[in-house]
Amino acid sequence: MIEQPNIKAQNELNSILENMTDYASIRKRVYRIKWLHAGTVRKISRIMLKEGNDAKVNYQTAACIILNGFLKIKFFYPILWRWFYYVKQYSEADLTEVLAIGKKKIPLESYYMNTILTTGMTDTMMAMTKKEVYSIRQGQGTAQHGTTIRNTDG
Protein backbone atom coordinates (compact mmCIF):
# COMPACT_ATOMS: atom_id res chain seq x y z
CA MET A 1 0.00 0.00 0.00
CA ILE A 2 1.37 3.40 -0.99
CA GLU A 3 1.31 6.04 1.72
CA GLN A 4 1.90 9.76 1.60
CA PRO A 5 5.26 10.88 2.96
CA ASN A 6 5.30 12.18 6.51
CA ILE A 7 6.02 15.82 7.29
CA LYS A 8 9.71 15.12 8.00
CA ALA A 9 10.19 13.58 4.54
CA GLN A 10 8.32 16.47 2.92
CA ASN A 11 10.52 19.01 4.70
CA GLU A 12 13.63 17.09 3.59
CA LEU A 13 12.52 17.15 -0.06
CA ASN A 14 11.67 20.85 0.21
CA SER A 15 15.13 21.52 1.61
CA ILE A 16 16.75 19.74 -1.34
CA LEU A 17 14.59 21.41 -3.99
CA GLU A 18 15.03 24.94 -2.64
CA ASN A 19 18.73 24.62 -1.80
CA MET A 20 18.08 25.48 1.79
CA THR A 21 21.04 25.55 4.12
CA ASP A 22 21.67 22.40 6.13
CA TYR A 23 23.70 22.49 9.30
CA ALA A 24 26.29 19.94 10.28
CA SER A 25 28.16 19.92 13.53
CA ILE A 26 31.60 18.64 14.32
CA ARG A 27 31.76 18.40 18.07
CA LYS A 28 30.55 21.85 19.20
CA ARG A 29 31.20 23.73 15.94
CA VAL A 30 28.27 24.09 13.49
CA TYR A 31 28.87 24.51 9.73
CA ARG A 32 26.44 25.67 7.02
CA ILE A 33 26.27 23.49 3.90
CA LYS A 34 24.50 24.38 0.63
CA TRP A 35 24.57 22.83 -2.86
CA LEU A 36 28.09 21.86 -3.80
CA HIS A 37 29.57 23.87 -6.66
CA ALA A 38 31.03 22.10 -9.68
CA GLY A 39 34.58 23.07 -8.66
CA THR A 40 34.02 21.57 -5.21
CA VAL A 41 32.81 18.28 -6.67
CA ARG A 42 35.79 18.30 -9.05
CA LYS A 43 38.20 18.86 -6.13
CA ILE A 44 36.61 16.00 -4.19
CA SER A 45 37.01 13.74 -7.23
CA ARG A 46 40.68 14.70 -7.46
CA ILE A 47 41.16 13.92 -3.76
CA MET A 48 39.51 10.51 -4.15
CA LEU A 49 41.73 9.57 -7.10
CA LYS A 50 44.96 10.60 -5.41
CA GLU A 51 47.05 7.61 -4.30
CA GLY A 52 48.46 7.25 -0.82
CA ASN A 53 46.21 9.59 1.16
CA ASP A 54 43.70 7.06 2.50
CA ALA A 55 44.01 8.22 6.11
CA LYS A 56 43.42 11.87 5.22
CA VAL A 57 40.80 11.64 2.47
CA ASN A 58 37.75 12.14 4.71
CA TYR A 59 39.31 15.20 6.37
CA GLN A 60 40.15 16.70 2.98
CA THR A 61 36.66 15.98 1.64
CA ALA A 62 34.99 17.48 4.72
CA ALA A 63 37.09 20.62 4.31
CA CYS A 64 35.97 20.95 0.67
CA ILE A 65 32.30 20.50 1.59
CA ILE A 66 32.53 23.13 4.30
CA LEU A 67 34.42 25.66 2.16
CA ASN A 68 32.43 24.99 -1.06
CA GLY A 69 33.76 27.69 -3.34
CA PHE A 70 36.71 28.19 -5.67
CA LEU A 71 38.45 30.98 -3.79
CA LYS A 72 37.70 29.53 -0.36
CA ILE A 73 39.13 26.17 -1.42
CA LYS A 74 42.10 27.83 -3.12
CA PHE A 75 43.12 29.79 -0.03
CA PHE A 76 41.80 27.92 3.01
CA TYR A 77 41.59 24.22 2.03
CA PRO A 78 45.24 23.35 2.85
CA ILE A 79 44.85 24.97 6.27
CA LEU A 80 41.39 23.65 7.15
CA TRP A 81 41.90 19.95 6.46
CA ARG A 82 45.20 20.00 8.37
CA TRP A 83 43.44 21.83 11.22
CA PHE A 84 40.86 19.02 11.34
CA TYR A 85 43.46 16.23 11.05
CA TYR A 86 46.48 17.42 13.04
CA VAL A 87 45.29 20.12 15.44
CA LYS A 88 41.71 19.17 16.37
CA GLN A 89 42.33 15.46 15.72
CA TYR A 90 38.72 14.75 14.81
CA SER A 91 37.71 11.12 14.57
CA GLU A 92 36.07 9.61 11.50
CA ALA A 93 32.77 9.59 13.42
CA ASP A 94 33.04 13.36 13.92
CA LEU A 95 33.08 13.88 10.13
CA THR A 96 30.18 11.58 9.24
CA GLU A 97 27.46 14.22 9.44
CA VAL A 98 29.36 16.64 7.18
CA LEU A 99 30.04 13.93 4.60
CA ALA A 100 26.43 12.70 4.64
CA ILE A 101 25.02 16.19 4.09
CA GLY A 102 27.65 16.88 1.42
CA LYS A 103 26.56 13.76 -0.47
CA LYS A 104 22.97 14.99 -0.39
CA LYS A 105 24.00 18.41 -1.71
CA ILE A 106 25.37 17.20 -5.06
CA PRO A 107 22.82 18.04 -7.78
CA LEU A 108 23.41 14.84 -9.77
CA GLU A 109 19.91 14.58 -11.23
CA SER A 110 20.27 17.93 -12.98
CA TYR A 111 23.79 17.05 -14.12
CA TYR A 112 22.66 13.74 -15.65
CA MET A 113 19.65 15.33 -17.34
CA ASN A 114 21.77 18.13 -18.82
CA THR A 115 24.32 15.59 -20.07
CA ILE A 116 21.59 13.58 -21.79
CA LEU A 117 20.07 16.68 -23.37
CA THR A 118 23.36 18.08 -24.66
CA THR A 119 24.45 14.70 -26.00
CA GLY A 120 21.23 14.57 -28.02
CA MET A 121 22.08 17.93 -29.61
CA THR A 122 25.41 16.84 -31.10
CA ASP A 123 25.64 16.32 -34.83
CA THR A 124 28.71 14.12 -34.67
CA MET A 125 26.84 11.04 -33.47
CA MET A 126 26.43 8.27 -36.02
CA ALA A 127 22.88 7.96 -37.35
CA MET A 128 21.20 4.65 -36.57
CA THR A 129 18.58 2.72 -38.44
CA LYS A 130 15.19 1.97 -36.87
CA LYS A 131 16.25 -1.64 -36.33
CA GLU A 132 19.39 -0.57 -34.43
CA VAL A 133 17.42 1.84 -32.25
CA TYR A 134 14.81 -0.84 -31.52
CA SER A 135 17.44 -3.40 -30.53
CA ILE A 136 19.21 -0.93 -28.22
CA ARG A 137 15.96 0.11 -26.54
CA GLN A 138 14.93 -3.53 -26.16
CA GLY A 139 18.29 -4.29 -24.56
CA GLN A 140 17.89 -1.40 -22.11
CA GLY A 141 14.41 -2.52 -21.09
CA THR A 142 15.41 -6.12 -20.52
CA ALA A 143 18.55 -5.13 -18.63
CA GLN A 144 16.37 -3.42 -16.05
CA HIS A 145 14.39 -6.62 -15.51
CA GLY A 146 17.46 -8.86 -15.50
CA THR A 147 16.27 -10.99 -18.41
CA THR A 148 17.57 -11.46 -21.91
CA ILE A 149 15.40 -11.72 -25.01
CA ARG A 150 17.01 -13.30 -28.03
CA ASN A 151 16.32 -11.95 -31.48
CA THR A 152 15.16 -14.79 -33.75
CA ASP A 153 14.69 -12.60 -36.83
CA GLY A 154 18.09 -13.61 -38.11
Image (spheres, rainbow, N blue to C red):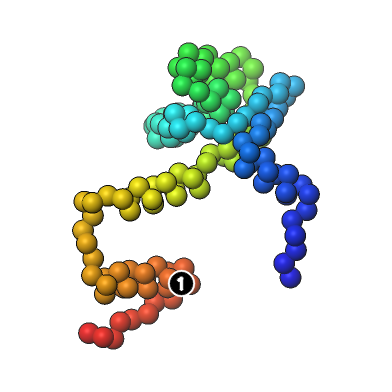
Circle 1 crowding by C-alpha within 10 Å: few under 14, some 14–19, many from 20:
few
Is residue 98 at all visible to an observer of this figure?
A: yes
Count of numbered marks: 1
- Residue occupying the point 75% across, 60% down: 4
Horizontal relation, residue 133 to residue 103: left or right? left
Q: Residue at x 63, y 38 (%)?
A: 18
Q: Residue at x 58, y 25 (%)?
A: 66
Question: Along the horizontal axis of the image, is 61 left or right of 39?
Answer: right
Say which element carries label 1: loop
**Circle 1: residue type:** Gly
- Circle 1 sits on which residue? 146
Quadrant containing the C terminus is bottom left
Question: Is 137 drawn above or below residue 151 in the view shown?
Answer: above
Q: Quarter of the image holding residue 103?
A: top right
Classify 133 as above or below 35: below
Position above or below: 61 against 112:
above
Residue 143 in the image, given as x and y percentages of width and height = 42, 69
Residue 2 in the image, given as x and y percentages of width and height? 72, 67
Residue 133 spot, x, y in % from top left: 30, 69
Q: Residue at x 43, y 71 (%)?
A: 141
Residues 117 and 24: in front is 117
39 left or right, relative to 154 = right
The answer to whether any part of residue 57 appears in the image is no
Quadrant in which the N terminus is drawn: bottom right
Can you give x and y, in whole percent of width and height, for residue 137 in the image? 36, 69
Q: Nearer the viewer, residue 102 or 70?
A: 70
For the residue pair 45 and 153, the one nearer the viewer reads as 153
